[in-house]
Amino acid sequence: MRKRLLALYPETWRDRYGTEMSALLDDTPPSVTATLDLMRGALVAHLRPLPGTAPATRARSTVAGVLGCFIAFCAFCAGFVKTTEGDGHVEHAHPLLGVAHSLILVAAVVAVSALVLAAAPLARASLAQAHRTRDPTLMGLIALLPAGIGIFAGSVGLLTLWLNAHHHHAGVGGWLLLGLCALCAAAASLACWAAPRAIMRRIDIPRSAFAVSIPAIALVAVCMAVIALATGVFLTGIVADSPSVAAAGNGPGQLIDVTTSIAIQLTAMLALSAAAVLSAARGLRSFGTL
Amino acid sequence: MSAVEIVVSARHQDYYVIRYTAMRSSDPSLLIMASLADGPKHGYAMTRDVKEMAGVKLGPGTLYGAIARLEERGLIEPLETEDRRRPYRLTGSGAAVLREQLTALERVARLGLGRLSAAEARA
């Protein structure tokens, strides 16, 4: 299990230190602190790449890094949407709340469009290589993406059908389905990050593909930062102008209030968008030397 | 800021003396260099040695993060891999930097202990 976490490290890092780190993990007993330390080390390794990394590898790492941050960011965005659903009226409490909400929506649409734009040339290159070489591993990796998304969409569809059939009373079956949905979402997220990363390692990516993908993925990172900042404005506005909404219970069992929920989401969004912007900036720099 | 500069500023401000000592004595890079001072070691041997020497348990991510930084700065260098385990050794500049840092720490510790003793004698 712990050795699988080495996959979180950048490609160049694994090439250089992977074997000896794996040997070290074999020599030491497993512990929660060591596992967390390994995950923290992976994050630092992404933020601070090894010197002498080839520009093409840096460009690939940038795409994979921003994609990973974006997927995790989406989870917190989904949390934000869930937290603020049904609070549409608060947008009229202060003009800033409405502006922040609109900005989040616009930035989300631009981010998704830019992600599709970034993925298009890479998808084209990988499909062309799979068609040409008939490499079964590459074809399997390509199939993993729609399979992951399909399973997630299927589980959400099942949950929706269940809730509709039971007049929105979840019951035990509904909670089980919700758990299944969460598992499928985690699996799909992992597939959507790991598969493109592995595909990019296996294919020859032309410079023209990076010429589109790197600026587009940088735009995704910028949109993430905009969404995080707008969420911060939204939180400030909701605390200042709608104290009753801010203090309302939220989350499973209403254990925390809306302010705490959004503050947690905001912290994660800021951290992830900062990591994405750093990664994108590195990719843009390396693109000049490709 | 070099170790010498820190010692100079430490003479003027006790707060920085304490902060610097606390920070540097658990710095993974310093601990790794100190561990390699008596000869080459691989990752596991370093973690075991650091645990015995300083009571600090270095996690795998922290250890290799520090090894990468030290290698990047030319303070340690890798040797031939032995059964998936790669030993590292201090370079000449690594030994010089380690000596400088340990000397600075020693002066800080001596200064702090001296002041403590003086304060206890006065009390």
Image: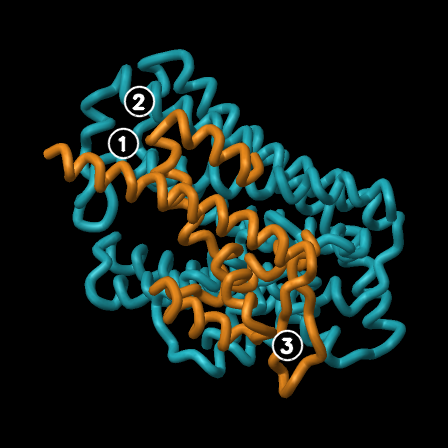
Chain colours: A cyan, B orange
Front tag of 1 and 3 = 3
User: Going from the N terminus, do you reach mark 2 or mark 1 first?
Assistant: 2
Tag 2: amino acid: Ile
The mark lying in front, picked from 3 and 2, is: 3
Q: Chain of mark 1?
A: A
The mark found on residue A259 in the picture is: 1
Q: Which mark is residue A238?
A: 2
Residue A160: x and y, percent? 37, 56
The residue that disc 3 covers is: B86
Q: Position of residue B122 (x, y in %)?
A: 14, 33
- Which residue is found at the position 73% from the left and 55% from the top? A60
Amino acid found under the numbered disc labelled 3: Arg
**Which chain is indicated by disc 3?**
B
Name above or below for residue B111 compared with residue A96: below
Q: Secondary structure at mark 1?
A: helix
Which quadrant would residue B20 be assigned to in this image? top left
Say whether marks 2 and 1 touch (CB < 8 Å): yes
Task: Tell me if residue A80 comes above or below residue B27 in the rendering.
Answer: above
Is label 3 on the same chain as label 2? no
Residue A164 or A103: which is nearer the viewer? A103
| The image quarter in which residue A219 lies | top right
Where residue A7 appears, as percent x and y from the top left, is 58, 68
Horizontal side of B38 relative to A180 (left or right) equals right
Q: Residue at x 41, y 30 (%)?
A: B11
Q: Nearer the viewer, residue A133 or B41?
A: B41
Inspect the image, locate mark 1, and give the three-letter code of the amino acid beneath it. Answer: Thr
Residue A192 showing in the rendered view: no
